[in-house]
Amino acid sequence: MEARMANPAAILDATTPIQGLYKAAYSGGVPKTTLDLVHLRASQINGCAPCVDSGARGARKSGESEERLFAVAAWREAPYFSDAERAALALAEAATRLADRSDPVPDEIWDRAAAHYDEKGLAALTLMIALTNFFNRLNVTSRQIAGAWG
C-alpha cells in the first residue's frame, strides 16, 4: 500500500492550527476516554484505517481497556459503556452519518447528550466529531496508511 500523497494538512502547514482545535476540544470538560471513543467510532464508520489505528493505540496508551476498544463498534449491545458514553457515541454516529436520514441529529439524540454534558461539553463533543470527520476525509481521500505515523 502506498499513500497518494503526504497528508494534505502537513503539506499546507495546517497542523498547528488544527492542533489548536484539538486542544480546544479537550478543554471542554469531557473525559479524554469519551473523546477517544467518539473519535474511534466515527473513524470506524468512515472506514479510516489510520484514524482507527492511531485512535485505538492512543486510547490504549491513555489506559482504555482492550475490552471497550473491541466493543465500541457494537456499543449498543455491549455492557462496558456508561450512559454518558452511550449518549456521546450516539451523537457521534448521527453527526457522522448526516446523509442517512432527513433529520440527521434528531432532538432525541441531542437531548440524551445534553442530559449528560453541559454546553461546553456538547461543544467539545461536537468539535471532536467534526475534527474526526475532517481527518477521516483527508486520510481516506489521500489513502494514508495505518501505522505510518509511528
Image: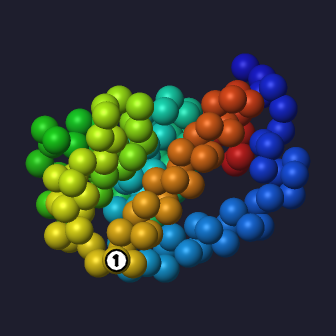
**Image coords of residue 139 (percent x, y):** 67, 37
Most distant residue in the front direction: 102
**Image coords of residue 24 (percent x, y):** 56, 75
Q: Can residue 59 be seen in this view?
A: no
Q: Is mark 1 on a helix, strand or loop?
A: helix
Kind of residue sitting beneath label 1? Glu
In the image, residue 138 sits, relative to residue 22, either above or below, namely above
Q: In the image, is 20 to the left or to the right of 65? A: right
Q: In the image, is 36 to the left or to the right of 72? A: right
Picture mark count: 1
In the image, residue 89 sits, relative to residue 137, either above or below, namely below
Q: Is residue 49 visible?
A: yes
**Are there few (<14), some (14-19), or many (20+) residues within 10 Å of tag 1?**
few
Quadrant of the rendered structure where residue 111 is? bottom left
Looking at the image, which residue is at 34% across and 62% down? 34
Looking at the image, which residue is at 52% across and 53% down? 130
In the image, residue 48 sits, relative to residue 65, either above or below, namely above
Quadrant of the rendered structure where residue 123 is? bottom left
Looking at the image, which residue is at 62% across and 37% down? 137
Figure quadrant of the N terminus = top right
**Image coords of residue 86 (percent x, y):** 21, 54
Which residue is tagged 1?
Answer: 119
